[in-house]
Each structure stands twice: as C-alpha cells, then as structure tokens.
Image: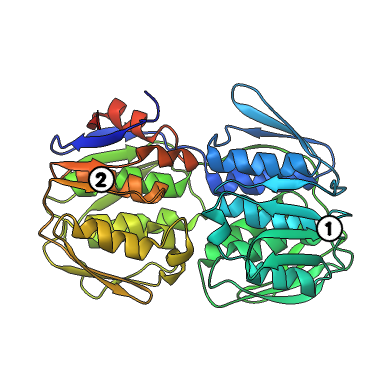
C-alpha cells in the first residue's frame, strides 16, 4: 500500500534510527516546468517530483501549448518559445503554485485563458498578483481577489510593486514571465514574506538564460532581451519534505539521516537550526544531513520566528507539543491562507491531545508537556499537517491520523518510506 486509503495509527517504537532519500522538490519542479514551457526548444527534467501538485502544473503548461512526456526518471518538455496557446480552461486542482504561476503564464497568451481549481483552491488569495499583472498591461479578471481568474492579451511590462504578505508566489510568478514582456519588468516585493523562495525563482530564471539584476533587497530588474533556452537539469531534493523526515529524530530521540540533502537556497533547509534550539544536533557529511534528537524535546525560550519558512509551523508546533514548557511561534500569519487555516487547525488538533495552544494573529503559543492519546487528529486535507502529526504520533501512543492520503499533494511515498524505515503504522477504520 503506497498511500493509505483509510485513517492510520502510528505505533511508537522508541528512538528511530533511519536513513531516507527525500523526494524531489515540488517548488523546483513547478518552477522548472514553467521555464521549460516558455523556453525555445526541448528540455529534459531529470528525477522530478511526481505528485498531485506537479501533475497540476503539468496540466497547466500543457493547456498553454507545451508538450510534456514522461519516462521512467525524467520529463521531456517541448517548449513554446513564449508563444502560448490562448483560450480554454486550466485546472490547477489544489495547487496554489500551479494556480498562481498559471495565471501569470496565461497573461502572456494572445486570448483569454481561465485558471480554476478544486473548491478549497478557490478560497486562496490571488488579488495582489492580478493587480500586478494589470499594472504590467494584462487583461485580467478575478472573483473578489480569488480564483477563478481569466487572463490573456500579452504584457507590456514596466515597474510594479507586489504585496507578498499573503504569498511570495505572487512575486515569483511575475519573475518567471518577465522575460516575455515587451519592455521588461522592474519588480519590487513588499510586505515581507519568505524572500528565499523569490530568490529561488530568480536563480532558476537566470540559470535558464534570463538577464536578472538585483536592485537592492526585494527588487529585481528583468530584461526583455534574454529569454529561456532549453536545458537538461536534475531536480534537487525537497527541503520541506526533508524537514518532516528529520523531525522524526527530534520527536523520538533517534538519529535520522536524509541522504540527498545537498546545499540549496530552499528556506526550509534552515529547520535544523530550529531543531538545535529544541535540543537536537545536526551534522552534514557531503549531501547527507543527520539530525540526532534529544532525550526530551526542549521548549524554546524567546520564541521562534518562522517568517522565512512558514510551511514549517506544522512541524515545529507538533514538536513543541512534546516539550515540557511553552514555545512561542511567530511570523506565520500567511499560513492562515494555505491549504487550510493552519494555525486554527493546529490549535484544534493539538487540543485533542490535551495540549494547550493559544492562537496569535501571526502564530501560536504551544504549551507542551501534556500530549496524551488516544486521539483522532484531522488533517484538514493538508499534507503538512499529516506529515507533522506522524512525527508526533511516533512518540505519543494512541494517535490516529485521518485522511493520510493528502500527502499525495507533495510526497506520495511518505507512508511507504516511513514503514520501510521502521516506523510502524496500521490502517484503522
């Protein structure tokens, strides 16, 4: 059974000693699909992530005229040279990345394209991206700042500010398409956010031939004279998924190695510094990163600002529930608009274990030390909640995780990898 089709109970087995290969990066795979679709010529993406989110991005670029074929370990993408196909409907499923990148790509098409998705996706914000595209000359219509979005007509370019408080994907989407505007783009990202993801986008675009100049913090100039050329690349590991695997060491007091965690600008790679504040140690040997967990998880005095890696609020909150004391997590207001309101969901689900959680406007205070089963934890159709709860359940007996199949969004092999590494779980009704 690769992905469980019922709820699962994780069976604690003491300190975990395990080695994992993390899956390929969702963030990188989807960026590469976008640039390869725009590029002139045929590209090869080796070892991409195969998941629901990347399947959604494949549908988007194929709907705009790119051709994507798959073999055992690579995708071949025949690019459009920026000559995207207009008309039609692009189905982004539950993928916020595919929806936002798809809206920006659709703006380059000669005639309107509609970008939509599953009902939960239609609650996610897109207004700042729509406003930016209008400033750059696109014809765009949304639904009160939410999808579906209709876009098309091409882009003149110019200078634009993008508010990234709700998502840095707004700025990344503009950077990806900027070389295909008529005048180029000067982009300034405002409002904070996880800037490293925008830097990841800029680095990806530059590696494929775009001319991008950084004009101070959060500001880039993209020339219209240098467009993407086809390339043959290997997708790096997913630092966010690796964090969930390494958290098993912190939760159980074991030793977990991710064997393919090479250097990356993905911000979630910084989670090991947070784990150190919770009593763990981390060491690198080439591309392998090993985390050794403490005998007891330590509460973090002074709090943790996760604004650089807000996706990891689920991981840190679950571990904080095991600590004997209070941990304050801040900088993650953006996660209220992710797959679910992650702060409300964490407060509700950890509360089922007897853990006191205070919601803050931009975070949580987790009063750890009292986590007890039995309890059934809802995942709210959120892959990161499911993976974070798995680490918690590897320490606390009697925890059942509902709808575990939501990991298909970014890590379909998660449960199979856990079982192969020695984390026992059983399906329950």
Badge 1 marks a residue whose secondary structure is: helix
Pinpoint residue 172: horizontal percent, then vertical percent: 64, 61
On screen, residue 375 versus residue 226, left or right, reads: left
Residue drawn at (71%, 57%) of the image: 103
The answer to whether 134 is drawn above or below residue 263 in the figure is: below
Quarter residue 395 falls in: top left
Q: Is residue 287 something that shows in the picture?
A: no
Q: Is residue 370 something that shows in the picture?
A: yes
12 or 374: which is nearer to us? 374
Give the residue at mark 1.
180
The answer to whether 165 is drawn above or below residue 274 in the figure is: below
Give the residue at mark 2.
391
Q: Quadrant of the N terminus?
A: top left
Q: Which mark is residue 249?
A: none
* Gap between marks 2 and 1 measured at Cα: 44 Å
Residue drawn at (30%, 60%) of the image: 346
Quarter residue 101 falls in: bottom right
Say which label, 2 or 1, has the lower sequence index: 1
Residue drawn at (45%, 48%) of the image: 239
The answer to whether 157 is drawn above or below residue 293 in the figure is: below
Badge 2 marks a residue whose secondary structure is: helix
Disc 1 crowd rating (10 Å Cα; few below 14, some 14-19, many 20+) is many
Quarter residue 421 falls in: top left
Q: Quadrant of the C terminus?
A: top left
On screen, residue 38 versus residue 170, left or right, reads: right
Pinpoint residue 141: horizontal percent, then vertical percent: 75, 66
286 or 351: which is nearer to us? 351
Pinpoint residue 295: horizontal percent, then vertical percent: 11, 50
On screen, residue 63 versus residue 92, left or right, reads: right
Pinpoint residue 235: horizontal percent, then vertical percent: 58, 39
Disc 2 crowd rating (10 Å Cα; few below 14, some 14-19, many 20+) is many
């Amino acid at each position: 059974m690769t992905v469980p089709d019922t709820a699962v109970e994780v069976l604690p087995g003491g300190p975990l000693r395990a080695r994992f290969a993390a899956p390929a990066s969702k963030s990188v795979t989807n960026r590469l699909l976008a640039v390869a679709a725009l590029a002139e010529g045929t590209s090869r993406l080796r070892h991409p992530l195969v998941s629901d989110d990347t399947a959604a991005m494949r549908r988007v670029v194929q709907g705009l005229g790119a051709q994507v074929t798959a073999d055992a370990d690579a995708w071949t993408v025949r690019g459009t040279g920026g000559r995207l196909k207009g008309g039609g409907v692009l189905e982004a499923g539950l993928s916020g990345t595919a929806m936002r990148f798809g809206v920006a790509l659709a703006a380059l098409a000669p005639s309107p394209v509609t970008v939509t998705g599953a009902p939960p996706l239609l609650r996610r914000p897109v207004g700042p991206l729509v406003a930016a595209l209008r400033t750059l000359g696109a014809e765009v219509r949304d639904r009160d700042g939410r999808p579906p979005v209709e876009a098309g007509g091409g882009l003149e370019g110019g200078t634009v500010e993008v508010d990234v408080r709700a998502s840095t994907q707004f700025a990344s989407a503009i950077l990806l398409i900027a070389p295909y505007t008529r005048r180029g783009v000067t982009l300034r990202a405002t409002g904070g956010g996880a800037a490293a993801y925008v830097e990841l986008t800029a680095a990806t675009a530059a590696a494929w031939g775009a001319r991008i100049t950084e004009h101070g913090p959060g500001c880039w100039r993209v020339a219209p004279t240098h467009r993407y050329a086809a390339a043959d690349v290997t997708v790096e590991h997913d630092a966010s998924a690796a964090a969930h695997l390494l958290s098993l060491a912190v939760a159980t007091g074991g030793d977990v190695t991710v064997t393919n965690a090479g250097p990356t600008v993905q911000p979630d790679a910084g989670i090991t510094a947070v784990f150190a504040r919770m009593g763990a140690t981390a060491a690198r040997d080439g591309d392998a990163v090993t985390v050794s967990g403490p005998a007891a998880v330590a509460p973090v005095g002074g709090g943790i600002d996760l604004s650089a890696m807000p996706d990891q609020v689920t991981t840190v909150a679950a571990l904080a529930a095991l600590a004997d004391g209070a941990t304050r997590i801040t900088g993650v207001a953006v996660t209220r608009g992710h797959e679910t309101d992650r702060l409300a969901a964490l407060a509700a689900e950890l509360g089922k274990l007897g853990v006191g959680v205070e919601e803050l406007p931009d975070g949580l205070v987790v009063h750890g030390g009292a986590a007890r089963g039995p309890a059934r934890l809802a995942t709210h159709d959120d892959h990161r909640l499911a993976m974070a709860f798995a680490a918690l359940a590897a320490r606390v007996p009697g925890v059942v995780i509902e709808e575990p199949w939501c990991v298909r969004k970014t890590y379909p092999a998660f449960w199979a990898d856990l079982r192969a590494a020695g984390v026992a779980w059983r399906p329950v009704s």
